[in-house]
Amino acid sequence: MKVILASKSKARREILEKLGFRVLQTPAEIEEVKAERASLEEVVKLVIRNAVRKAEKIARKYPKEVIIAADTVVYFNGEILGKPRSLEEARVFLRELRNKWHKVVSGYAVYTPRGSISGHEITEVKMRDYTNGEIEHYLSSGEFQGKAGGYAIQGRGAFLVEEVKGCFYNVAGLPLAKIVQALLFLGYWPPR
C-alpha cells in the first residue's frame, strides 16, 4: 500500500517502509508555527497544528491517497529546541541537555479518503553525562543538522542517550504506535 509522507525526513520514510508501506515523499512546504517559550499544553497544540497544516496541504493535491504528516520538537525547561540553525546552536543544545531529562513532543495527522485523525505523543528522554569531547565528536559528523534538539537517536546520536520512557520512534520523529492506531481505525492497517 502506498502512503504519502508530507515530509522530507529520511528517518520517517524508513520507519514507514519497515512497516511495509511504499512511501512517496512530498514535503509540505508550509511556514511552521513556532514559539521559543511555551507551556507543554501550548507546545502540544503547536505541533498538532503544524502536522495538520502539512497534511491538509498535501491532501488538496492527493485527495484519494493516505497522507501522513508529523511535527516534532524537543521541550526542555519551558523552551522549545527545534532544529539547530548552526553548529554553535547545536553545541548549546547538547550542553543544556547533558545529564538531564527532556520531552520529545510530536504532533501527527493521518488524512485518508475515509476521514482524518490527528493527535500527539510525548516521550521522555534522559541524556548521558557525556563530555565536551563527545559533543564535538558527534557534531563533527554533521548528523545534528535538521534534527530537533540537535541529535538523532536513530543514528550516531544514540550514544548520547541514557534512557527513553515512551515511544522510541517518536524521538526519531514519527509517533508510530499512534499512527498505526489511526490507520487501523480508518481501515488502512495492516498495509495491503
Image (spheres, grey):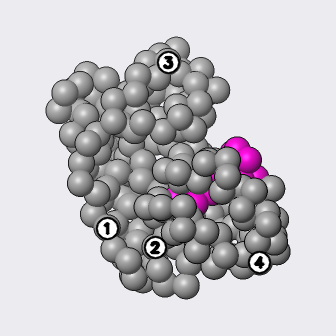
Q: Nearer the viewer, mark 1 or mark 3?
A: 1
Image coordinates of residue 159 in percent, x first then y, are 80, 56
Badge 1 marks a residue whose secondary structure is loop
Please report the residue visible at 54 percent of the width from the left and 61 percent of the height from the top: 87
* Tag 4 near tag 1, CB within 8 Å: no
Q: Is residue 41 above or below residue 170?
A: below
Q: Amino acid at mark 2?
A: Ile
Left/right placement of residue 85 relative to residue 161 reads left
| Disc assigned to residue 22 | 3
Please report the residue visible at 47 percent of the width from the left and 80 percent of the height from the top: 79
> Which residues are drawn in magenta?
148-158
| Disc assigned to residue 80 | 2
Query: In whole angstroms, how far apart are the C-alphas of marks 3 and 4?
Result: 39 Å
Image coordinates of residue 2 in percent, x first then y, are 43, 18
The answer to whether residue 171 of the structure is visible from this angle is: no
Which residue in the protein does label 1 denote? 34
* Tag 2 near tag 1, CB within 8 Å: yes
Badge 3 marks a residue whose secondary structure is strand
Q: Is residue 118 above or below residue 187?
A: below
Please report the residue visible at 58 percent of the width from the left and 44 percent of the height from the top: 176
Query: Is residue 110 located in the magenta-colored stretch of the structure?
Result: no
Q: Is residue 186 above or below residue 168?
A: above
First in sequence: mark 1 or mark 3? 3
Q: Nearer the viewer, mark 2 or mark 3?
A: 2
Left/right placement of residue 78 relative to residue 46 reads right
Which residue in the protein does label 4 denote? 99
Please report the residue visible at 24 percent of the width from the left and 33 percent of the height from the top: 59
Quadrant in the rendering for residue 37 = bottom left
- Residue 80 or 137: which is nearer the viewer? 137
Left/right placement of residue 16 relative to residue 38 reads right
Q: Amino acid at mark 3?
A: Arg
